[in-house]
Image (cartoon, helix red, strand yellow):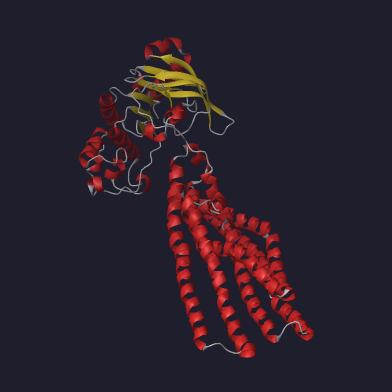
């Protein structure tokens, strides 16, 4: 049962176990809920037919049942609520750990606001149903056959009068399951699309204002809200009709009992007392069935959310062994790569970046330079060929082993809404304040940090909104300096820097790169003329490689790039 729940609702192993426990306790409560009816039947039988037993017999039986119900109810509460809340925490942690092991390609195909809602809102909804609907539903599935057998054994006609209407109501519910699931999925997807639209409007508010698109954007959002309300109203109407129909059929239990019971009394088969007990039992079963109809609909409501979480769980994570790397030569051997599985970004790419040397990748925009850095750092996995660090194929190395040895500075900088100090410390979390400040000074951050209100403790806003592009870039470079990893990947680090700061950072880099494997991308070809090895890329392939002087005479592409660089530098607006 644990594995069933775990698979059915994309839970952790502990979550499956917890749901099984709460189901069993709910089942016991269903059984115990019938015991007071049995005690009442015992009392009425004595009062009307056989004579009353001593009063303390009834009192003792009621007290024993009450105490036992109280004990089981506490266990049920703990299993349904306390354990469920713990499962929601485990589930969120588990999802985050899975996401941490997914390649970057997963995030390029999934909206980040959608993922955050899955972790927070979807898990919360599943938690709610785990603590209310699911245990009661599955406990009823266990309880219903037992109760039906007892009713049918006691009196086949009266038992059928209870069982048939209740069964019919559930048959109607089962027949409507696909309709309800489709409706819930439509609502779920539309809510996610609307959330993404609102998120996009917030993130692009500057562009929206700059291009005078406020009215158009506002109208679009209002239309989305109206479409959502219309869809919810339509699907809720269907749900009401389904719920109402199933409940209405359930109400046939009482008339059916009365009709059958009166006929049996006239035949002399049963007495009034017997019919009275079946009426009480029938009302109890009917009330439970009505509640279960509601629980079924609640469980169906979270199915799209469960499917989303299951999709994350079933996504292919990056596997690998923990390896102690000692040699940091990076070799690409006939490496191929595609982002979408159709359009090749890299094809048959082969070169080696040696430890202790600086290797520069040059080429026109879109030729695959940044993609190579992403593959080397295993943010993406190659779709063909092999990439090795030392003698190890990186597809067999755990991302933890690889990431700990790689420092990356991309041209698209991501910063956190915290202090300057903590943003740099991400490079090496255990670093002291002194080490962080030293890295910041090497990255030429000190001049602008000193001007901030609280210096290194100043909060810089979401993604460094309080800083300029060049200042954000320097913080990213400071992270790399602080990490001091043996592999250094630099992608257009000077794109947002002025000439003065670029020169100062270049001097710091010259001391940092000693003994390291460095791969750098730069459109300012003047800055890479003196590197140890230059790889010229064109249309996803290596067109030529060598030193600057050699490539000027052997590579038309490199010569053309140098000429265009010269023309750009001489251009005057």
Q: Residue at x 28, y 27 (%)?
A: 509
Horizontally, is 355 left or right of 260 in the view? left
Q: Residue at x 54, y 56 (%)?
A: 221
Q: Residue at x 25, y 41 (%)?
A: 448
Horizontally, is 444 left or right of 56 in the view? left
In the image, residue 521 above or below residue 399:
above
Q: Quadrant of residue 342?
A: top right
Whether residue 76 is visible:
yes
Please name whichever residue, 144 or 375, is drawn nearer the observer in this view of the structure.
144
Please name whichever residue, 44 or 3, is drawn nearer the observer in this view of the structure.
44
Q: Position of residue 523 (x, y in %)?
A: 40, 26
For the N terminus, the image quarter is: bottom right
Q: Quadrant of residue 398?
A: top left
Please name whichever residue, 264 or 370, is drawn nearer the observer in this view of the structure.
264
Please name whichever residue, 103 or 208, is drawn nearer the observer in this view of the structure.
103
For the C terminus, the image quarter is: top left
In the image, residue 386 above or below residue 147:
above
In the image, residue 72 above or below residue 321:
below
Q: Position of residue 72 (x, y in %)?
A: 48, 69
Q: Residue furthest left?
A: 434
Q: Position of residue 309 (x, y in %)?
A: 52, 49
Q: Quadrant of residue 143?
A: bottom right
């Amino acid at each position: 049962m644990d594995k069933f729940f775990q698979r059915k609702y994309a839970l952790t192993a502990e979550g499956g176990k917890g749901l099984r426990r709460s189901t069993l306790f709910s089942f016991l409560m269903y059984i115990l809920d019938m015991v007071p009816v049995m005690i009442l039947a015992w009392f009425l039988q004595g009062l009307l037919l056989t004579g009353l037993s001593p009063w303390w017999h009834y009192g003792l039986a009621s007290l024993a049942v009450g105490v036992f119900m109280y004990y089981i109810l506490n266990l049920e509460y703990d299993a349904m609520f306390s354990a469920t809340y713990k499962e929601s925490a485990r589930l969120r942690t588990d999802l985050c750990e899975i996401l941490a092991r997914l390649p970057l390609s997963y995030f390029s195909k999934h909206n980040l606001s959608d993922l955050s809602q899955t972790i927070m809102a979807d898990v919360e909804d599943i938690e709610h149903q785990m603590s209310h609907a699911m245990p009661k539903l599955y406990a009823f599935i266990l309880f219903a056959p037992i109760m039906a057998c007892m009713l049918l054994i006691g009196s086949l006609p009266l038992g059928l009068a209870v069982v048939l209407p209740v069964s019919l109501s559930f048959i109607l519910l089962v027949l409507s399951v696909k309709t309800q699931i489709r409706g819930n999925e439509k609502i779920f997807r539309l809510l996610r699309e609307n959330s993404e639209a609102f998120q996009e409007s917030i993130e692009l508010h500057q562009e929206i204002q700059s291009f005078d698109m406020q009215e158009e954007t506002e109208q679009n959002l209002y239309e989305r809200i109206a479409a959502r309300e219309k869809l919810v109203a339509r699907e809720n109407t269907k749900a009401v009709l389904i719920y109402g129909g199933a409940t209405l059929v359930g109400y046939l239990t009482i008339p059916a009992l009365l009709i059958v019971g009166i006929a049996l009394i006239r035949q002399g088969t049963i007495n009034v007392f017997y019919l009275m007990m079946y009426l009480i039992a029938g009302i109890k079963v009917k009330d439970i069935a009505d509640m279960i109809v509601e629980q079924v609909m609640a469980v169906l409501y979270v199915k799209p959310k469960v499917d989303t979480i299951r999709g994350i769980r079933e996504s292919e994570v990056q596997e690998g062994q923990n390896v102690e790397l000692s040699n940091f030569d990076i070799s690409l051997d006939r490496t191929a790569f595609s982002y979408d599985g159709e359009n090749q970004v890299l094809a048959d790419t082969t070169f080696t970046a040696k430890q202790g040397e600086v290797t520069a990748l040059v080429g026109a925009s879109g030729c695959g330079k940044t993609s190579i850095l992403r593959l080397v750092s295993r943010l993406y996995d190659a779709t063909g060929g092999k990439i090795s660090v030392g003698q190890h194929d990186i597809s067999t190395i755990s991302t933890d082993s690889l990431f700990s040895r790689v420092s990356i500075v991309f041209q698209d900088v991501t910063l956190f809404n915290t202090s300057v100090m903590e943003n740099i410390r991400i490079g090496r979390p255990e670093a002291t304040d002194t080490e962080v400040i030293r890295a910041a000074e090497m990255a030429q951050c000190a001049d602008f940090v000193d001007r901030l209100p609280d210096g290194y403790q100043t909060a810089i806003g979401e993604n460094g909104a309080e800083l300029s592009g060049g200042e954000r870039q320097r913080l990213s470079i400071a992270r790399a300096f602080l990490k001091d990893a043996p592999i250094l990947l630099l992608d257009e680090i000077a794109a947002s820097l002025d000439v003065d700061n670029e020169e100062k950072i270049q001097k710091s880099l010259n001391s940092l790169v000693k003994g390291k494997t460095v791969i750098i991308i730069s459109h300012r070809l003047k800055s890479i003329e003196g590197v140890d090895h230059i790889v010229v890329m064109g249309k996803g392939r290596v067109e030529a490689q060598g030193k600057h002087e050699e490539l000027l005479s052997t590579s038309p592409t490199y010569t053309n790039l140098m000429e265009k660089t010269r023309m750009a530098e001489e251009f005057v607006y």
